[in-house]
Image (cartoon, helix red, strand yellow):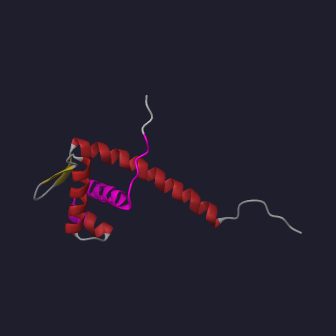
Amino acid sequence: MPVRPIARLSRSDLADLNAFKAVERLRSFTKAAVELGISTSALSHSVRNLETRLGVRLLNRTSRTVAPTEAGANLALRLEVGFREIGEALDDINRMRDRPVGRLRLN
């Protein structure tokens, strides 16, 4: 199996993925916007831009409901794993900061 190069993600890519994940998890643009501290309009633009860049619809929207498409559910599942890994890596770093590490020399 050929090795694929690692994708370079910009800050806006990560923000848009996080925005999508919040909407997918909460099944609501309004609730996700409140959680993320941004306007519903900005959140909608963020998700729409992500869908445009990916070339696939991630969420089915109606006036009353938001539900992931098959592609959206698949992406959300993968993001859950990836974001959990990132969170655990940051927790590990924080634990290293909170306690002394290394060799102590007394003269």
Name the quadrant containing residue 10. bottom left
Q: Residue at x 26, y 48 (%)?
A: 54
Q: Quadrant of the image for the N terminus?
A: top left
Residue 101, how many percent across, how many down? 71, 61
Task: Using residue 55 as the reference point, say whether residue 22 is left or right of it.
Answer: right
Q: Residue at x 23, y 41 (%)?
A: 70
Q: Is residue 27 visible?
A: no
Name the quadrant containing residue 37. bottom left
- Seen in the picture, residue 70 relative to 59 is either above or below; the reply is above
Q: Quadrant of the image for the C terminus?
A: bottom right
Q: Please check the rendered image and state whether residue 48 is part of the magenta-colored stretch, yes or no.
A: no
Q: Residue furthest left?
A: 63
Q: Main secondary structure of the magenta part?
A: helix
Q: Please check the rendered image and state whether residue 21 is part of the magenta-colored stretch, yes or no.
A: yes
Q: Which residues are magenta?
A: 5-31
Between 33 and 17, the one lying in front of the other is: 17
Residue 84, how many percent across, how many down? 44, 52
- Seen in the picture, residue 12 relative to 73 is either above or below; the reply is below
Between 16 and 24, the one lying in front of the other is: 16
- Seen in the picture, residue 59 relative to 12 is either above or below; the reply is above
